[in-house]
Image (cartoon, rainbow, N blue to C red):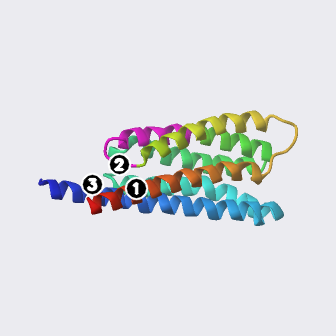
């Protein structure tokens, strides 16, 4: 493979990641807006949003892994698909109990999915740009998950707004990675 072919393959992968990260950021921004507006006004809307969030994560990880060699070649994402799918069901069950249970389920999910995202970013470190933000995001997610579990034990019932801040930070990190990849791509094109 020539240098030009290698650069083309790398830029194609970065192009996919850039689009993927922009899509993840956009979804999270829309989810946060819906959570802070309709989700605060209507429990059925909040419940739907709380179910959609981990389900979206499972679907997004599945598509990204499929675009990058399949689930067998992307173990951390394959596990993340399974964890996010299981947690989608756990959130459905938790919604029948209380918002404290929902927050605890989100806490477990945030810990596991964050650590798996961190693993994916570390694996991509040498081949893709913007992974430092994904590493920070994965670590922050795990810390936020521990805080959610602690907060779920408090007598005051949580709301969807507690999770919206977490989703907002996720949107920020995905946007930073997408912008980083965009700038890196522009620099390569002009060099």
Residue in the image at 76% along x and 53% along y: 161
Residue 10 is tagged as 3
The main secondary structure of the magenta stretch is helix
The numbered disc on residue 181 is: 1
Q: Is residue 188 magenta?
A: no
Pointer 1: residues within 10 angstroms few (<14), some, or many (20+)? many
Identify which residue, 105 or 190, lies in the foreground.
190
Q: Which residues are magenta?
A: 112-129
The residue under the point 37% across, 39% down is 123
Residue 119: say if magenta: yes
Q: Quadrant of the C terminus?
A: bottom left
- x and y percent of residue 115 in the render? 52, 37
**Cα distance, mark 3 to mark 1?**
11 Å
Q: In the drawing, what numbered circle is on residue 155?
A: none
Instruction: State the residue lying farthest toward the right.
Output: 155
Q: Earlier along the polypeptide chain: callout 2 or callout 3? A: 3
Q: Is disc 2 placed on a helix, strand or loop?
A: loop
Nearer-N-terminus badge (3/1): 3
- In this rendered view, identify the residue nearer to me: 46 or 19: 19
Q: Which residue is mark 2?
A: 128
Q: Position of residue 70 (x, y in %)?
A: 34, 51
- Marks 1 and 2, how far apart at CA: 8 Å
| Contact check, label 1 and label 2, Cβ < 8 Å | yes
Q: For residue 188, which quarter of the picture?
A: bottom left
Percent position of residue 100, x then y: 79, 42
C-beta proximity under 8 Å, tags 2 and 3: no
Q: Residues within 10 Å of mark 3 (few under 14, many from 20)?
A: some
Judge from the rendering whether residue 12 lies leftward or rightward of residue 119; answer left or right: left
**Depth check, front residue: 146 or 170:** 170
């Amino acid at each position: 493979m020539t240098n030009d072919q290698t650069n083309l393959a790398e830029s194609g992968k970065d192009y996919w990641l850039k689009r993927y990260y922009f899509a993840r950021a956009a979804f999270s921004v829309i989810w946060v807006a819906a959570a802070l507006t309709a989700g605060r006004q209507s429990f059925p809307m909040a419940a739907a949003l709380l179910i959609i969030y981990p389900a979206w994560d499972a679907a997004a990880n599945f598509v990204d892994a499929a675009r990058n060699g399949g689930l067998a070649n992307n173990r951390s994402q394959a596990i993340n698909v399974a964890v996010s799918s299981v947690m989608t069901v756990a959130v459905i069950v938790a919604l029948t109990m209380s918002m404290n249970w929902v927050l605890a389920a989100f806490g477990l999910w945030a810990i596991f999915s964050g650590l798996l995202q961190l693993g994916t970013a570390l694996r991509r470190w040498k081949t893709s740009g913007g992974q430092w933000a994904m590493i920070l995001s994965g670590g922050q997610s795990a810390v936020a998950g521990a805080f959610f579990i602690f907060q779920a034990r408090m007598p005051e019932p949580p709301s969807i707004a507690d999770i919206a801040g977490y989703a907002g930070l996720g949107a920020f990190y995905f946007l930073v990675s997408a912008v980083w990849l965009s700038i890196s791509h522009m620099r390569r094109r002009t060099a």
